[in-house]
């Protein structure tokens, strides 16, 4: 059985974006493309309607490209359980209002038993200073949290198997 990965919206966004002039962002885009091409088949990859909604926003041409990347991926449902957990994460960590959707991504991945949540959102999701709080809240609510990581981290794990 393959490990299960939930893709947060930054992943299709980086895959579909024009190459950035910002060196760090360009490196993240390249790493995301490398993971997508080389490693994606090693995982069962999922998204949610939240990802679809976010991918629909912005420039119509870019939105169409993002949506085409994810159109064949299975959707995880938003449920009463995911909303309850998202609310707990949001309120207990005291995230800013704009980060409510980030708590929902975490909750959806957690409630549906994903092994990994893949993201470049290092402000409210893949944030080392929040990780222990997120994990504790998930466990207090009866769930085992996914490993929250970037494509770079999963790619490094794949590269280790080559040696």
Image: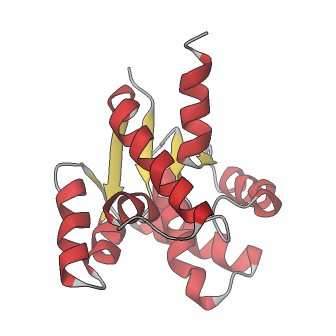
Q: Residue furthest front?
A: 21
Residue at position x 24%, y 49% from top?
Answer: 74
For the point 17% across and 56% down, the residue is 71
Tell me if residue 101 comes above or below residue 66 in the rendering. Answer: below
Q: Give the quarter of the figure containing the C terminus.
A: top right
- 128 relative to 116 in the view: left or right: right
Q: Nearer the viewer, residue 37 or 96?
A: 37
Residue 43 visible: no
Residue at image coords 46%, 50%: 30
Q: 41 above or below 94?
A: above
Whether residue 33 is visible to the viewer of this picture, yes or no, is: yes
What is the basis of the colouring in this image? Answer: secondary structure
Q: Quadrant of residue 42?
A: top left
- The image quadrant of residue 121 is bottom right
Residue 96, position in %: x, y?
A: 67, 87
Residue 142 position, x and y percent, is 63, 49
Q: How many marks?
A: 0
> Which residue sits furthest top?
163
Q: Position of residue 81 (x, y in %)?
A: 47, 63
Left or right of 125: which side holds 1?
A: left
Quadrant where the N terminus is found in the figure: top left
Front position in the image: 27 or 50: 27
The residue nearer to you, when weighing 147 against 113, is 147
């Amino acid at each position: 059985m393959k490990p299960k990965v939930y893709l947060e919206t930054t992943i299709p966004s980086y895959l579909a974006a024009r190459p950035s002039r910002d060196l760090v962002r360009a490196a993240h885009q390249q790493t995301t493309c490398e993971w997508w091409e080389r490693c994606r088949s090693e995982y069962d990859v999922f998204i949610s309607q939240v990802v679809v909604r976010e991918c629909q926003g912005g420039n119509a041409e870019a939105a169409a490209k993002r949506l085409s990347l994810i159109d064949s991926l299975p959707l995880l449902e938003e449920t009463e359980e995911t909303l309850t957990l998202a609310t707990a994460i949001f309120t207990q960590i005291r995230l800013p209002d704009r980060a409510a959707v980030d708590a929902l991504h975490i909750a959806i991945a957690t409630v549906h038993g994903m092994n990994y949540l893949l993201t470049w959102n290092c402000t409210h999701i893949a944030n080392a200073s929040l990780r222990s709080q997120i994990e504790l809240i998930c466990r207090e609510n009866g769930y085992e949290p996914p490993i929250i990581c970037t494509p770079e981290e999963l790619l490094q794990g794949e590269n280790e198997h080559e040696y």
